[in-house]
């Protein structure tokens, strides 16, 4: 994909995600979302990406096994890949799989490449570049890799990221820059083409609210260390803290106003970078594209 600003729609195949848990267990809901992305893509002549996840890594949820994760993909995603309308709707789409289980990626990758004939993204929230990741990347040249900032010590504890909040001596933005530079150096040392790598600050992972705000404010500190990014703050709890909503649901809804402004600012400032904007609502992304012209 050559476009520099790509919407990455979150598709949660989970019962307990904070924003849409259980919604996409209904195939008609997922197909309706695909139609919306396809229509916008056709009208705006822009590609889009769909980020499928089968485990909620929010701190209040229990981790699931790779077997349980695969069962969800097998039950809710794979049947859709045999649906003629779905295949048509996916012609302009790129697949991203949000998983810290390499075995899940290994199973899904050939199926997704066959459907879309495009590169697939492994959105690995673990923040761990281990031998499993290296081997999978070296074996599959059609696979791009999202390297996320997560300070959990190993893959198995990826979803326990809030037990490992950063408390080092550096400012969070300087720590993030160093974390990414070391990760890129390690990948390069294993002959992984860095053009395949996408970085994600992972707002909300291993970070306090103050860290998240600081990373928004000081994004110039770390953004220049690479050209490809995933950026996403959609419905994040630290944004909800600003909202005047009466209850949790309304605060989450109103926080998308701040999200839109943040997106518009990023789009304006970082127009020369290749960025996937991770979103829950496509209309917010489209409105941000318009709003950036007013900044």
Image (cartoon, rainbow, N blue to C red):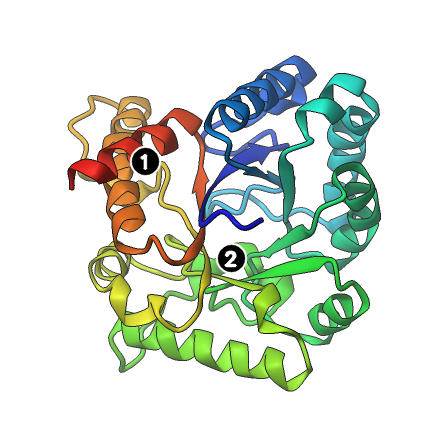
Q: Residues within 10 Å of mark 2 (few under 14, many from 20)?
A: many
Tell me where residue 29 appears, x and y as whole percent: 60, 16
Residue 114 sits in which quadrant?
Answer: top right
Q: Nearer the viewer, mark 2 or mark 1?
A: 1
Tell me where residue 58 appears, x and y as whole percent: 48, 45
Q: Is residue 57 visible?
A: yes
Q: Residue at x 52, y 77 (%)?
A: 183
First along the sequence among labels 2 and 1: 2
Residue denoted by label 1: 289
Residue 255 versus residue 282: which sits nearer the camera?
282
191 up-or-down from 114: above or below: below
Residue 47 sits in which quadrant?
Answer: top right
Quadrant containing the C terminus is top left
Q: Secondary structure at mark 2?
A: helix
181 up-or-down from 201: above or below: below
Q: Secondary structure at mark 1?
A: helix
Tell me where residue 268 appears, x and y as whole percent: 26, 48
Q: Is residue 240 visible?
A: no
Residues at marks 2 and 1, CA–CA distance in whole angstroms: 34 Å
Q: Residue furthest top?
A: 28
Tell me where residue 212 appears, x and y as whole percent: 28, 56
Please tell me the numbered disc located at residue 160: 2
Q: Relative to residue 142, is residue 111 drawn left or right?
A: right
Q: Residue at x 45, y 74 (%)?
A: 180
Residue 248 versus residue 86: which sits nearer the camera?
86
Please tell me the numbered disc located at residue 189: none
Q: Residues within 10 Å of mark 1 (few under 14, many from 20)?
A: some
Residue 53 versus residue 291: which sits nearer the camera?
291
């Amino acid at each position: 994909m050559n476009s520099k600003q790509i919407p990455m729609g979150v598709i949660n195949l989970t019962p307990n995600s904070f924003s849409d848990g259980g919604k996409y267990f209904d195939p008609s809901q997922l197909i309706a979302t695909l139609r919306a992305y396809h229509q916008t893509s056709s009208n705006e002549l822009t590609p889009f990406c769909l980020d499928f996840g089968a485990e909620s890594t929010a701190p209040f949820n229990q981790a699931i096994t790779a077997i349980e994760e695969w069962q969800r993909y097998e039950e809710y995603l794979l049947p859709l890949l045999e649906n003629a309308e779905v295949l048509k709707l996916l012609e302009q789409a790129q697949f991203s799989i949000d998983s810290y289980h390499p075995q899940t990626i290994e199973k899904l990758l050939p199926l997704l490449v066959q459907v879309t004939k495009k590169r697939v993204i492994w959105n690995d929230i673990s923040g761990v570049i281990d031998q499993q990741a290296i081997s999978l990347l070296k074996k599959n040249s059609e696979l791009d890799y999202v390297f996320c900032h997560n300070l959990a010590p190993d893959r198995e504890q990826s979803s326990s990221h809030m037990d490992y909040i950063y408390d080092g001596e550096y400012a969070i933005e300087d720590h993030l820059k160093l974390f990414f530079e070391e990760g890129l150096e390690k990948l390069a040392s294993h002959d992984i083409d860095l053009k395949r790598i996408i970085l994600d600050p992972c707002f909300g992972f291993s970070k306090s609210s103050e860290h998240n705000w600081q990373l928004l404010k000081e994004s110039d500190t770390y953004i220049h260390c690479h050209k490809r990014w995933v950026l996403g703050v959609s419905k994040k709890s630290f944004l909800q803290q600003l909202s005047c909503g009466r209850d949790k649901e309304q605060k989450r809804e109103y926080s998308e106003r701040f999200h839109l402004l943040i997106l518009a600012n990023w789009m304006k400032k970082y127009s020369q970078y290749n960025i996937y904007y991770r979103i829950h609502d496509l209309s917010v992304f489209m409105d941000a594209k318009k709003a950036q012209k007013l900044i």
